[in-house]
Image (cartoon, rainbow, N blue to C red):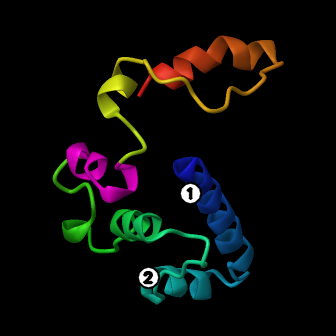
Amino acid sequence: MTVCSNILSLGQWTHLVIQSISENTDIMYHKIINDPLQFGAEFTDEARDILTGLLTRDPSRRLGLNGAEEIRHHPFFNNHIDFKKLSEKKIQPPFKPTVSSPVVRLRLPLLLTSF
């Protein structure tokens, strides 16, 4: 459940970031380039660490520079995701959305398996 709540927190954080973006794009870009990341108390240490690693401005120091395994082995995923079972599609998703649109229903399998 922690992974789900952290993902929800990421969505909330993204929403707050978008809300706080200034109408003045120069100020917005300055903030993106220079301001430190800020996280609310609802973020676990592991969630803060993985987001900080993924959003590191210097690409030569960014989490994942040495491949996806570096991200998979991050403590954020410990005790939450068994990547072997995930790759074998042996994990049941905690949530299955109801899809009513025939167009989305036809494209959804393609979208989920194309990466």
Q: Residue at x 63, y 68 (%)?
A: 13
Q: Which residue is mark 2?
A: 33
In-front residue for pair 23/57:
57
Percent x, y for residue 15? 70, 65
Instruction: Answer with left or right where residue 78 lies relative to residue 102.
Output: left
Q: Is residue 105 above or below residue 68?
A: above
Marks 1/2: CA–CA distance: 25 Å
Percent x, y for residue 3? 52, 50
Badge 2: residue crowd in 10 Å (few <14, some 14–19, many ≥20) = few
Q: Residue at x 73, y 27 (%)?
A: 97
- Inspect the magenta stretch and tell me whether residue 33 lies in it: no
Q: Amino acid at mark 1?
A: Asn
Q: Residue at x 38, y 69 (%)?
A: 49
Q: Which residue is mark 1?
A: 6
Q: Residue at x 60, y 78 (%)?
A: 41
Q: Is residue 26 above or below residue 84?
A: below
Percent x, y for residue 28? 60, 82
Q: Amino acid at mark 2?
A: Ile
Q: Quadrant of residue 59?
A: bottom left
Q: Which residues are magenta?
A: 68-78
Q: Secondary structure at mark 2?
A: helix
Q: Quadrant of residue 111?
A: top right
Percent x, y for residue 17? 65, 73
Instruction: Answer with left or right where residue 92 lies relative to residue 96.
Output: left
In-front residue for pair 29/90:
90
